[in-house]
Amino acid sequence: MDILNDVNAIFRDVLENDDLVITPDTTSADVEEWDSLNHIQLVVSIEKHFKLKFSANEIRNWKNVGEMCDAISLKLSA
Amino acid sequence: MQVGDKYQYEFEVSRETYDGFLGIFNDRNPLHTDKSFANSKGFKDVVMHGNILNGFVSYFVGELLPTKDVMIIQQEIKFHSPVFLEDTLSFSATQSAIFESVNAVEFKFEFINKNDNRKVAKGKLLIGLI
């Protein structure tokens, strides 16, 4: 499973930006539409898509998309 | 608030609600205001604005949930059958998910017309607990 590819599709859907390309280094500062309310929808969509649950502590320290994808990978392999 | 929690309420599409919606938003499309036009389109009377139901959803979130610390993040609604003046709608909402990571809960809801038991609309809500 290409987690980054799936996450990119989720970002495009939630942020309604079909041209968006994210990389592991992408942060919310790099994407205009990635605001606090959209962040909630992104996390909800990720949890639904990958059928997993995060805690508030687990997502609090994500610094970029790469750390988000690492956390997803870790959950999926647990 | 737990998954499976169910809320029920009745809403009447009263003259006051209809007039208020017309007065505030000024959507006077003839489907909503001209009975002969509505008849010509196959409806028995003028059709109530679908977004009146969104106002009822707002009441559910703001007034019927056990906490006032709420904010609508996302709302989807699909309309299935028309609503007419003074119809009474049975509203039910069930909590379908909780997302502790972002302090949000999801509800699925539907409106049933009590006059004929037809499903009027159904939808989904994502609510942030602020």
Image (cartoon, rainbow, N blue to C red):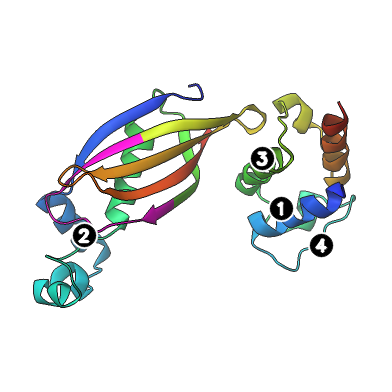
Residue B65: tell me if it is visible: no
Q: Amino acid at mark 4?
A: Val
Residue A23: tell me if it is visible: yes
Callout 2: SS? loop
Residue interval drawn in magenta: B77-92
**Any mark on residue A21, and which?**
4
**Any mark on residue B21, and which?**
none
How many C-alpha atoms fall within 10 Å of the one at disc 1: few (<14), some, or many (≥20)? some
- Residue B12 left/right relative to A74: left
Is B85 magenta? The answer is: yes
Residue corresponding to mark 3: A48
Residue corresponding to mark 2: B48
Residue at (17% x, 67% y) in the render: B43
Q: Position of residue B72 (x, y in %)?
A: 47, 42
Disc 1 and disc 2: Cα gap in Å?
36 Å
From the viewer's side, name the closer residue of A56 and B77.
B77
How many C-alpha atoms fall within 10 Å of the one at disc 4: few (<14), some, or many (≥20)? few
Residue corresponding to mark 1: A10
Q: Amino acid at mark 3?
A: Lys
> Which chain does tag 1 point to?
A
Residue at (39% x, 26% y) in the render: B6
Q: Are marks 3 and 2 on the same chain?
A: no
